[in-house]
Image (tube, rainbow, N blue to C red):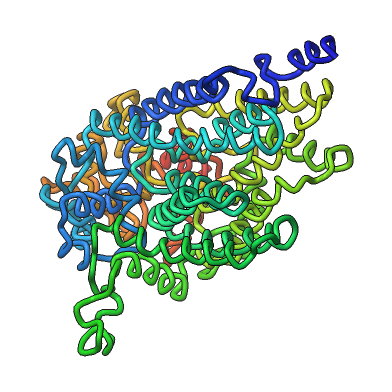
Amino acid sequence: MERAGRRRLIWYPLGMTRDPAKHGGWDRPLAMATLIAAAVLIFRGILIAHYHGPNIDENYHLYRGLLFLRGDWKGLRGIRLNDPPLGEALLAVPAWLNGQHLSDPLHASAWSHGFPPPAKFCYVMPDPVRIETAIWKSLLFLPGVAVIFVWVRSVYCAASAWLALAMVLTEPTLAALVPLPTPDGLAVEGIVIGAWAVWRFVTAPTGLRQVEAAAAVAVAMLLKPNGIVLPAVAVVLAMVHWRLRDRADLPRKIRSFLLACALVPVFIWVLLLGDVSAPFKLSDRAIFRSGPFRGGIPAGLYVESVWDPILQERAGQTGYLLGKTSLFGWWYYFPVVAMYKVPIGMGIVAALALASAWRIKPRYEETPLAVCAVAWTAATMLQYIDVGFRHFLPAEIFLLMLCSRVLAEPGRIRRLAAWLAIAGGAIDVVAWTPDYLSYVNFPRQAAYLDISDSNVDWGQGIKQVRRWIETQPADGRSIYLAYFGPTDQDLFAQIGPRLTEYLVISGSWIARPEGCADPVVGLAPDHGLLILSPVELTGQYDPSDRFARLRTLPPDQVIGHCLLVYDLDRLRTRAGR
């Protein structure tokens, strides 16, 4: 027995056994996993903040987060609110502490017709604050990493927990989003922690776990609208557990569960600092004008943040996939995009995990992971807005946790194959540093024509454009930029005097205020250098489809793995021949 025990210590990474109690009075593996995650996330976040500029979603999240932190309820209630304010407040903490101010980014869009917005409507977060935000967001993600490690270890073993950690730190879309002032990474973390707290309460109900579960669910719901799936998941988990494992004293358990459900809206109201308001989109309804709720309802801000996405889905939003556009998306959007965005190494581990079902029979402890994976997969496949793989991350995280079952039993060949696959995937992802958002899992010709939008370009490449222009010979050639990014920026101020003119998502070419010596005539330039966003190339938001002729032509260069450079003079000369 002693000999077998020593052999088991060799089998598991870093000599960790299945039982964390054997490590002494404190959880050394968990502490080590958290420190490794902190080092990776912070270093990677600083790189992204240094090399990338603001993406198209950052400023309106920051603006609303700063309104919440400053207690500007009037401002919050008068703007579009399609994400709950708590997540935006958390990501805006560094900007708030540094005294940053910005106007409503929508104000700038009114000026994006022929000339840049006035300085009072422009905002670019200073680089030191961007770096602080990246560090802050990376630290905020650590509790989620710790829960994933502990949860997987309790379901499988320490080896599986380390594998799950490696996959989470390798996932490129998550790597890109965690340090950004957007709520996507926080939402994934909130969902994981909320589901874990619910399962702990359902399987071993106590008063403390009841409060923890209610608070965790409330927080998850306040980070992003996709958290609204969590209460339904909690009901399913409770019913499954009571039906299959624990029918004893069922009336008491049901009462305790219902009380936890009742606590969720209380926590939402408390976390919104006692907000009582009429949802902006519903404020004209009779019940809010002269009915019993004319003074508003508790947590009206949250109701607004849920109702607005519902209206947005009903109206639809143009999506793009495999050369086609659709106002209401495709049910198969995320499976197709996953074939491009998920590292091949993770795909190999997923295949090994499926094969392991023959040897490692499904265990009851995997139930919450499977239920959550199915729930968020179904929710994302049924939604009508398909503009980025980032919306699939909650489902992917639970799928990765399930894939770690491949190491649930000792097996040297299986262990070696899994770790080699993840190592290969990690090397491939690192090669894209810092452009993780644009990651594609193996070389494809013009993948940006298959999976456009925030899967490739989110407006993050302005700093890289500036550096690229500075390296080009000053030969007097005109340089044009067709840009998919925030409209509350003056790109002439950011890029410098060599930029001739730029196009924003509204469809207007922006000329220099002092005058442009070589303005665009017609829909698109026909000479000089053109730096083109893939989103503009696909024409998904441009009824004129002005760059259609370039879709069949390979770019001369690519900036930041996403922005395409075309030498229009060379193309014209070649066409003339």
Q: Quadrant of the N terminus?
A: top right
Lateral position of residue 529 relative to residue 154, left or right: left
Image spot of residue 261 (x, y percent): 47, 64
Hey, which residue is sitting farthest right in the picture?
A: 358
Classify residue 297 as left or right of residue 329.
Answer: left
Q: Position of residue 546 (x, y in %)?
A: 43, 59
Q: Is residue 358 above or below residue 9?
A: below
Q: From what the image shows, is residue 466 above or below residue 334?
A: above
The spot of residue 461 in percent (x, y) is 38, 38
The quarter holding residue 523 reads bottom left
Residue 163 locus on image (x, y percent): 66, 29
> Quarter of the image holding residue 305?
bottom left
Which residue does the image show at 88% across and 37% down from the upper left? 359
Question: Looking at the image, can residue 446 be seen?
Answer: yes
Residue sitting at x 11%, y 45%:
514
Q: Nearer the viewer, residue 436 or 450?
A: 436
Give the mark count.
0
Foreground of the two, 448 or 101? 101
Q: Residue at x 15, y 65 (%)?
A: 74
Is the residue 501 above or below the residue 323 in the image? above
> Which one is in front, 315 or 110?
315
Going 24% across and 64% down the picture, which residue do you hit?
A: 275
Residue 452 in view? no
